[in-house]
Image: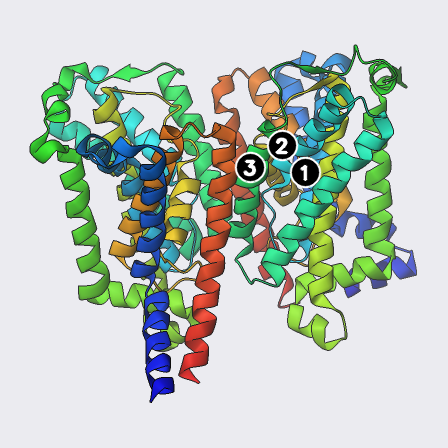
Amino acid sequence: MNEKQKSNKSDILLKLFLNPEIGIMIPILIVCVITTMLKPNFLTWKYISSILVGSVFIGAATLGECLIIMSGEIDLSVGMNGCLAGIVMAMAASEWHLPLIPCLLLCLLTGAAVGLLNGFCVCHLGLSSWITTLATQFICQGLAVTISQGAPISIMSLNTGEFVRAKPLGLSWMFFIFIALIILLDILIRRTRYGYYLRSVGGNQDASVMAGLNAKRIKLIAFVLAGVFAAVSGMFDTLNAGAMNAAFGGGREFRAIICCAVGGISMAGGAGSSFGVALGVLLFHTLWYCLRILDVNTNLQLVLIGLILVMSVIMDTQRKRLEARKMV
Amino acid sequence: MMNEQAVKGTSFPKLRAILGTDEFGVFLPLVGIMVVTTLIRPDFLSVGNFSAMFTQLTFIALTALGASFPLMVGQVDISTGRVAGLAGIIMSALVVDGGMNQWVAILIGIAACLVVGLINGILVVYFDIPDFVATMGTLYMVGGARYLFIKGYQFSLTTQEGFTLVAVFDKRYLGMPIYFWLMILIFAFVFVVIKKTLWGRRLLAVGDNREVAALAGINTNKVRIEAYIISSFLSAIAGILLTLDIGLGLPETGDGWEFRAIAGCVVGGVSLAGGKGSPLGVLIGVSLVFVAENAIIFLGCPATMKVAVQGLLMAGAVLFDLYRQKRKIPA
């Protein structure tokens, strides 16, 4: 009797461990508790809202990245793609004097075009994804610096200041757009046929091709969507700063990949959820924010981030092993 | 591969054997770029320009040689640049801050990097973490760790007593600094190891097809870990050489080297699928990247396009490699 209860209890713990979404909640709580202990006024709305608002920039890029990782590839161009898209948007506003909507569309189109290029190279030319997206990262960076001449480009003419400064519910409009994107992505991944196909291609490409899926097209769409999400993150940057600089977005691809890994997206492809990614972004951003509040050495922060990445991926592989053992 | 060797064995059509090698495939565009640029801007082919280019190239070339080892076994290591920086900063911190003997400091710097390589290898091989993500983790850790050594003042090696190496590095032998010749020596040594020893054959066999190699009795895990350790070792040497050259321990040494190194490897015919690559190809590949970057500036492109050219070169090189592999399979 006693033993049975015990095994039941460990079963529940195991289930909690196996659930990636709950697995991330624990470290988020730990980070918050430690920070609150060291800095008692941390748990005030001022800090919490600024964490939530600040997470949208990396968050939008991460949503795109997670689609790519789910399909079993990797995208290193999201940071610079977003930067280029933001630069194009700012150019459209300041040099070509276009109104707001065409500027935003141009921004998204730029991102989609880079995504399409990535997808074409990976799916149709058969290049490996990281080398392709590394190449497009370089190309985007070169173009962004060349177009902007290294100087920030203002978007004053768009009059977006009010939109950015507005604080609905104490947060920002961009935050709510981000929430909407998360929900949309969740619907796409879990409720549509495309999401199902995407995960099956990521899980086992050969098997899904044999089952009659057009893996090339599915991946191509994922790359284009990732490009659009990257452009959204660049757009957020541009709107928020009121200008775009080619220095924005550097290294964002790495942080996006870390957020995905922390958020339970399996690096081997095929598994993950949009809410998990959102939590991963939240954890990463909370941690980064807390380290800054606690005045931890910036370089020690990098070390910690690297450690967390490795730990979370090790957790993921261990989780898979446990799952496999349970199935047997 | 067998075919080429058979041709070489008869020693009759030697020229054709050379023309058929992968290295020659990289050499051709290198010469092409140089000829075109020289035709448009004759001062491109000056001695000063080339010696400047090739002295800069030494460090990236050594890092690329290191990075080519994991690539040859079918893995990737993106932590190489930061590892180079780590070696340099540890060495200079020990000498300037700890007053240590220069040679001991160099050895400790290299040893620290060997540990990083070992960690990379263990994470990839035993924890089964995708190589890209695992080495990204060490990239962050090592990248941050480099800055933990700085003390708010410069680690200047030139004013250090008993530190004779910087003076040696300032001198030129046969028109080039000593580290350039050292690099050539290391490349020659690695070339012999890869092409002529059993160990080199094993390395390429593991990269070509891991299952077959394991069935043939090769300890593939050991070979893969060794590849990561060598990658860190050669990067550490590159970092230390740069630190000795500038005579200053800078924590930001090595930022961004990893991708230029991989670009050089890829352009130089190291297949990303593993199992193919040669040190000579890597050297030519890195030269090609540097010459191309230099050439576009001579041709009047904005210098800001340098990165973009690097990206284009890399994509082009991989495409070319794929095309060549497809052509080889039916034969």
Cα separation, mark 2 vs mark 1, equals 6 Å
**Residue at left 43%, top 50%?**
A121
Q: Residue furthest left?
A: A168
Which disc, if any, is residue B313? 3
Is mark 2 in CB contact (under 8 Å) with mark 1?
A: yes
Check if mark 2 and mark 1 are on a common chain: yes
List x then y, in percent, for residue A232: 24, 37
- What x and y, as percent, mark residue B17? 81, 52
- Give neighbour class at mark 1: few <14, some 14-19, many 20+ (Cα, 10 Å): many
The kind of residue on which mark 3 rests is: Leu
Q: Which residue is mark 1?
A: B285
* Residue A3 horizontal side relative to residue A161, left or right: right
- Three-letter amino acid code at the position of disc 1: Gly
Q: Quadrant of residue B66 in the image?
A: top right
Q: Chain of mark 2?
A: B
Of the numbered discs 1 and 3, the one sitting upstream in the chain is: 1
Question: The N terminus of chain A is located in which quarter?
Answer: bottom left
Instruction: Kindly check if marks 3 and 2 are in contact, taking CB atoms under 8 A apart as contact.
Output: yes
The residues tagged by marks 3 and 2 sit, at their Cα atoms, a distance apart of 7 Å
Up-down: is B35 above or below B155? below
* Residue toward you, B193 or A263: A263
The location of residue A278, given as percent across then percent down, is 27, 49
Q: Residues within 10 Å of mark 2 (few under 14, many from 20)?
A: many
Q: Give the quarter of the image for residue A13.
A: bottom left
